[in-house]
Image: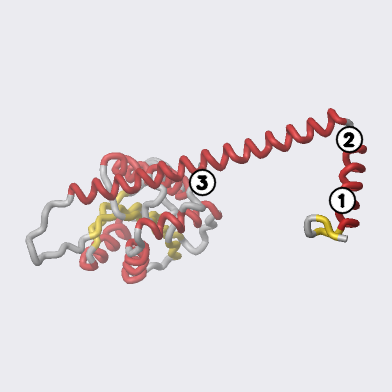
Amino acid sequence: MYKNEFPADTMAGLRRTNLMSSDRLPNGAAADRDVNTVRSLEQQLAVAHERYLLLAADFDNYKKRIAREMDQRPPQPEGIVTMTRHIIMVDRDHIRREAARKGLQPEGFEAITFECGQEAIRHLLFNSTEGAVIDFGCAHERSGALPDGKRIVQEIMEMDAFLPLVLISDRSDFLDHETVSAADFVLRRPVSTSQLKNALNTVLSETIRERTQRKSQYIYAFR
C-alpha cells in the first residue's frame, strides 16, 4: 500500500525510527540540541551576510573610483584617441625599475615607480591608478631590510580589492596561497618587457563585472 506516494511500510519504519530516536534523548536534551542547531545556523547566516556587505561595499567603491577617473580625464580633440594606461610599479632595484618604466612607455603605459611598499600605499591614498606591478621581494618601508611583498599586496587589497595586480618574484621565492590568489598574474624572473606588457594588457582588458566575479572569492583571504 502507498500513502502520499510512499510505501506504507516505509513510512511506518520511519515513524518507528523517529520515536526510537526521541526515546533516547530526554525532552530537555532534545530541546537543547534544537536550540544549538538554530544558533549555529543563525551564526553562519550572520557571517555570510557580513561577507556580502563587505563585497558590496568593495564593489561600490570600485565603481565610484572608475566614475571619478572618467570625470577627471580631460576632454580629447575629435579624432584623437589616447591609449595611455597609468600604473604604479614597486621594485627594490632602481635600474630594473627604470628599465621597465622606459620599456613600457612606448607600449602605452605610464608607470610611476616606487622603491618600497609604503611609498606606493601613500600614493594610492590620494591618487588613482589602473593597475599595479609589485616586486614580491620589496620591503614595506624604505629602511626595511627584509622583503615584505605579502604585506604590500595585503594593504593594496584592503584599499582596492579589484585593482589589477601583477606580481613579480624570483624563482626561489615561496608564494603562499593568499598572495597568489590576490594577484591577477604571477611572473617569475627573468621577465621581459613583452611579458610584462602582455600580462598588463590581459588583466586590463577585463570588464569590471568579469574581474569582480573572478576575484570576489579571494578578497577575504586577508581579512
Q: Nearer the viewer, residue 82 or 187?
A: 82
Whole-percent x, y for residue 208 in the image: 36, 56
How many labels sit on residues?
3
Front label number (3 vs 1): 1
From what the image shows, is residue 48 above or below residue 164?
A: above
The image position of residue 5, as x and y in percent, is 78, 59
Regarding mark 1 in the picture, which secondary structure is present there? helix
Of circles 3 and 2, which is in front?
2
Q: Which mark is residue 220?
A: 3
Left or right: 72, with 11 as reference point: left
Q: Regarding mark 3 in the picture, which secondary structure is present there?
A: loop
The reply to whether discs 3 and 1 touch (Cβ–Cβ < 8 Å) is no
Rendering quarter of residue 193: bottom left
Return the x and y of residue 16 as percentages of the image width and height. 91, 47
Spatial CA distance of label 3 from label 2 is 40 Å
Q: Residues within 10 Å of mark 2 (few under 14, many from 20)?
A: few
Q: How is the image coloured?
A: secondary structure
Dot 1 alpha-carbon crowd within 10 angstroms: few under 14, some 14 to 19, many 20 or more: few
In what element is the residue under mark 2?
A: loop
Cα separation between marks 2 and 1: 17 Å
Question: Label 2, on which residue?
Answer: 25
Which residue does the numbered mark 1 point to in the structure image?
A: 14
Quadrant the N terminus occupies: bottom right
